[in-house]
Amino acid sequence: MLYTKDENDEAQLWRAMYAGKYGEHTLYWLNCMLGGMKEPFALDRFTGALRNNADVYKSMNSSAQDQLLYFTEVGDTGRVYIHLYDKYNSQDNPADLVLTAAPNPNGVNGNNSPTSLTQAGNVYWSEYADGNPGQRWVVETKIEGESPYTIARATDFPYDKYYQHDANIFYPSFVGECTWYCNGRFLEVNNKIPFCTGNAADWINDNYDASVCECDKGKPSNEIILKSKSIAVFGPTTENPSTAGHVVFVESVSEDGNTIEFSECNRTVGGKFALSNKQIEVRNSELKAAMDGCKQTMSRSDFNKLHKFALIGDIYEKNETVL
């Protein structure tokens, strides 16, 4: 609801989290600061009895389309429209839904839910209407985050590659996992879907589309030939006994094979909010900041034992030239 501005009220503070690109639009989640750093709550579209009400719902994996937003400017007024990416009032009626303020500022401050979309102080999603002042918003910046484009990113997480169901079998349950990322990154770079399945370490067991991919496996780590634009597969060791393993995307390999440039997702560290580059949130897990989707460079010897795993295979596009 809308309520009188209070600088000390955390429920009035929001974090705009970069969520990737889709066409011309930059997508965001608006996470309410009241949820804290560990379990954010995102602005979304209520789909129950009061359909299209703007409510705040716990963001479990930050993949729900009805929590994705984009902004457009209202001419040169300094105001913006806040558009909902999910454009459906129903399955059959697409609409450009924008955040809309009901007349009168203050709603009921308590446990009562609004009984109608236009109840005083309510905020809801309504079809765009030119000239409607209740759809024009002023955004005041309290703290400005770092731009996601200021460091060496491998990807800006294009929505159609990473979140589209038929392009990634790990959506939506495993958004943010290394497996979700590598399937999406392989599609983005090679324009082919590897259809890798199961835990990361199992991918070398022919858990991929053999018409698309081949795998170098069954050798000691230092004898596996790594290729550019491939998926490196890691398995458990005594130091890291996790049988799930890990996968990363190999961006490039130096001519002598001694330097590997790669990107990955789901670097876990204790007690941290899910941030990448201080702005991208891919999942409500404990990810190390400034790592997801970023380019990293490492010597081949260190790469062979990445995160204390052991390199056990390399999945690459079929008939690709070995560099």
Image (cartoon, rainbow, N blue to C red):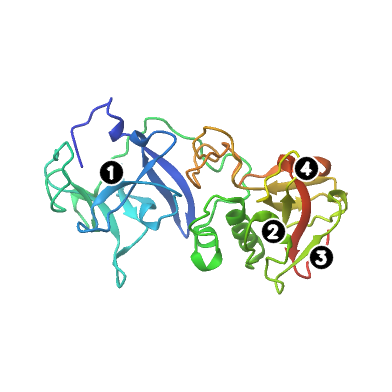
- How far from the left and from the top, in percent, is residue 2? 20, 40
Q: Tell me the residue that label 3 is attached to.
A: 321
Q: Tell me the residue that label 2 is attached to.
A: 202
Q: Tell me the residue that label 1 is attached to.
A: 77
Q: Nearer the viewer, mark 4 or mark 1?
A: 4
Query: In the image, what residue occupies the spot 12% across and 46% down?
Result: 103
Q: Nearer the viewer, mark 3 or mark 1?
A: 3
- How far from the left and from the top, in percent, is residue 244? 65, 51
Q: Nearer the viewer, mark 4 or mark 2?
A: 2
Q: Nearer the viewer, mark 3 or mark 4?
A: 4
Q: Nearer the viewer, mark 2 or mark 3?
A: 2
In three-dimensional space, the C-alpha distance between marks 2 and 3, rounded to whole angstroms, equals: 25 Å
Quarter of the picture holding the N terminus: top left
Q: Amino acid at mark 3?
A: Thr
Task: Looking at the image, tell me whether mark 2 or mark 1 is earlier in sequence order.
Answer: 1
Task: Looking at the image, tell me whether mark 2 or mark 3 is earlier in sequence order.
Answer: 2
- How far from the left and from the top, in percent, is residue 5? 22, 31
In three-dimensional space, the C-alpha distance between marks 3 and 4, rounded to whole angstroms, equals: 25 Å
Up the image or down, 77 lies above or below 143; here it is below
Q: Tell me the residue that label 4 is attached to.
A: 305
Task: Looking at the image, tell me whether mark 4 or mark 1 is earlier in sequence order.
Answer: 1
In three-dimensional space, the C-alpha distance between marks 4 and 1, rounded to whole angstroms, equals: 55 Å
